[in-house]
Image (cartoon, rainbow, N blue to C red):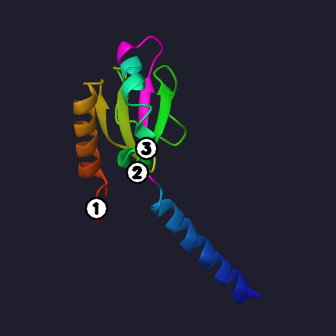
Amino acid sequence: MAQIRNLLAACAVFFGAALSAGAAPQLVMVERDGCHWCEAWNEVIAPIYPKTDAGAFAPLLRVDLYEDPPEGVRFARPVSFTPTFILVDDGRELGRIEGYPGEEFFWALLEKLLTDTTRYGAGS
């Protein structure tokens, strides 16, 4: 019986570590009502973001500027501008894009952020 308990405990540790190691990055969009640039992003990028490789790799999570960060997430510094896009992994900020610089610049900045801070694009 003790051997079975030890085996179950070892499996729990192994699978718990495997699950936490497999946690995916998320792109947190901090926005606020009435933000013109948030509306522009929502009109141009939001409909296609989940269909892109970046959107599949780092799903979008929306947060209001006046609310606390999502549970378990720590921002490196306060958010001052909307929209602000914060790439987080395992609850820790990896980097951010402040503002919406337009479609072409957004995708280029996001691609750089993802490739510089994660395994995005590795092996593809």
**Residue at x 25%, y 51% (from the top left corner):** 115
Q: Amino acid at mark 3?
A: Lys
Q: Nearer the viewer, mark 2 or mark 3?
A: 3
**Residue at x 42%, y 24% (from the top left corner):** 42
- Image quarter hosting the N terminus: bottom right
Q: In terms of sequence position, does the residue under pointer 1 or pointer 2 come before the other?
A: 2
Q: In terms of sequence position, does the residue under pointer 3 or pointer 1 come before the other?
A: 3
Q: Nearer the viewer, mark 3 or mark 1?
A: 3
Please state the horizontal and vertical placement of residue 88, each as a whole percent of the image.
40, 44
Label of residue 55 in the image: none
Please state the horizontal and vertical placement of residue 102, each as a whole percent of the image.
26, 25
Q: Amino acid at mark 1?
A: Ala
SS at circle 2: helix
Label of residue 57 in the image: 2
Residue 84 visible in the current orientation: yes
CA gap, disc 3 and disc 1: 19 Å
Q: Tags 1 and 2 in contact by the CB under 8 Å rule?
A: no
**Residue at x 43%, y 43% (from the top left corner):** 51
**Residue at x 45%, y 41% (from the top left corner):** 50
CA gap, disc 1 and disc 2: 12 Å
- Mark 1: few/some/many CA within 10 Å (<14, 14-19, 20+): few
Q: Say which residue label 1 marks.
A: 122
Q: Say which residue label 3 marks.
A: 51
Q: In terms of sequence position, does the residue under pointer 2 or pointer 3 come before the other?
A: 3
CA gap, disc 2 and disc 3: 10 Å
Q: Is residue 19 left or right of residue 4?
A: left
- Mark 3: few/some/many CA within 10 Å (<14, 14-19, 20+): few
In this rendering, the answer to whether 43 lies above or below 93 is: above
Tell me which segment is drawn in magenta. 24-37
SS at circle 1: loop
- Mark 2: few/some/many CA within 10 Å (<14, 14-19, 20+): some
Q: Amino acid at mark 2?
A: Phe
